[in-house]
Image (cartoon, rainbow, N blue to C red):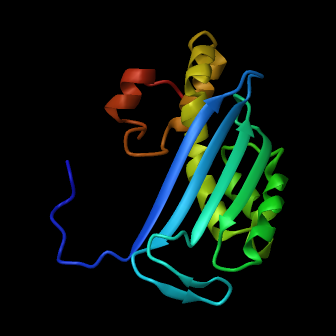
């Protein structure tokens, strides 16, 4: 169902965000994200001169390499387009995310390693969405493991309960999938 009809308005800014999850031949998974920001009008920029309509103001890439337990084995970032010439200098710092796990405390760990002046706001913002893509990418592998392992099944349930509307402890989704197991 689409949104309601909008008020009369002027198109000013576009952000395109593409994310993909891949299984590698070595058993790891690559999660890739690409962010592009454009404007619909020309504007001046101190480092790049005039940025034309449709020309990328931001053009950034991230690749997380994770295992099936969502441990980050590597992170690569690239900034192709930025408002300032200095911005691409933050990209190599994202390699510091290797060794952290996507799960509880992930956002805090990201801030500790690439927060503030150590990182880039746009690359950091992508990481939250990439974490969700990583979870969706490894889902089938984890689901097979959980199907035959009661401890893994309980851990999955505990990880999911209370994370959204559908996973409320008393929702029909939870009751159908797991029943009324103790947490």
> Does 112 sit left or right of 30 as displayed?
right
Residue at 59% across / 24% down in the picture? 154
Q: Residue at x 35, y 35 (%)?
A: 171
Which residue is located at x 68 percent, y 36 percent?
A: 30
In the picture as drawn, the residue positioned furthest to the top comes out as 148
Q: Nearer the viewer, residue 41 or 90?
A: 41
Quadrant the C terminus occupies: top right
Q: Is residue 183 visible?
A: no
Residue 72, x across and y down, in percent:
76, 41
Along the line of sight, the residue nearer the viewer: 158 or 51: 51
Instruction: Using the image, determine if residue 68 lies above or below residue 83.
Output: above
Left of 128 or right of it: where is 2? Answer: left
Q: Is residue 181 left or right of residue 69?
A: left
- Residue 125 location (% of width, % of height): 60, 62
Quarter where residue 58 is shown: bottom right
Above or below — where is 3 with respect to 137?
below
Depicted 27 relative to depicted 111: above or below: above
Look at the image and tell me whether residue 135 can be seen: yes
All told, the count of numbered labels is 0
User: 110 or 14, which lies in front?
Assistant: 14
Residue at 71%, 44% in the rendered image:
64
The location of residue 110, given as percent across then percent down, is 73, 58
Name the residue nearer the viewer: 51 or 133.
Answer: 51
């Amino acid at each position: 169902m689409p949104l309601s009809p909008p008020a009369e308005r002027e198109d000013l800014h576009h952000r395109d965000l593409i994310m993909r999850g891949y299984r590698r031949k070595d058993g790891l998974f690559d999660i890739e994200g690409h962010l592009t920001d454009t404007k619909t009008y020309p504007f001046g920029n101190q480092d790049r001169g005039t940025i034309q309509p449709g020309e990328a103001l931001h053009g950034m890439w991230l690749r997380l390499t994770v295992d099936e337990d969502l441990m980050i084995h590597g992170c690569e970032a690239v900034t192709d387009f930025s408002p300032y010439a200095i911005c691409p200098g933050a990209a190599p710092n994202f390699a510091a995310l290797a060794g952290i796990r996507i799960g509880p405390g992930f956002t805090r760990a990201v801030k500790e390693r690439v927060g503030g002046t150590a990182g880039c706001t746009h690359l950091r913002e992508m990481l939250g969405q990439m974490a969700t893509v990583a979870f969706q990418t490894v889902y089938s592998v984890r689901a097979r493991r959980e199907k035959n392992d009661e401890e893994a099944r309980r851990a999955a349930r505990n990880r999911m309960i209370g994370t959204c509307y559908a996973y409320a402890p008393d929702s029909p989704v939870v009751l159908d999938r797991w029943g009324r197991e103790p947490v």
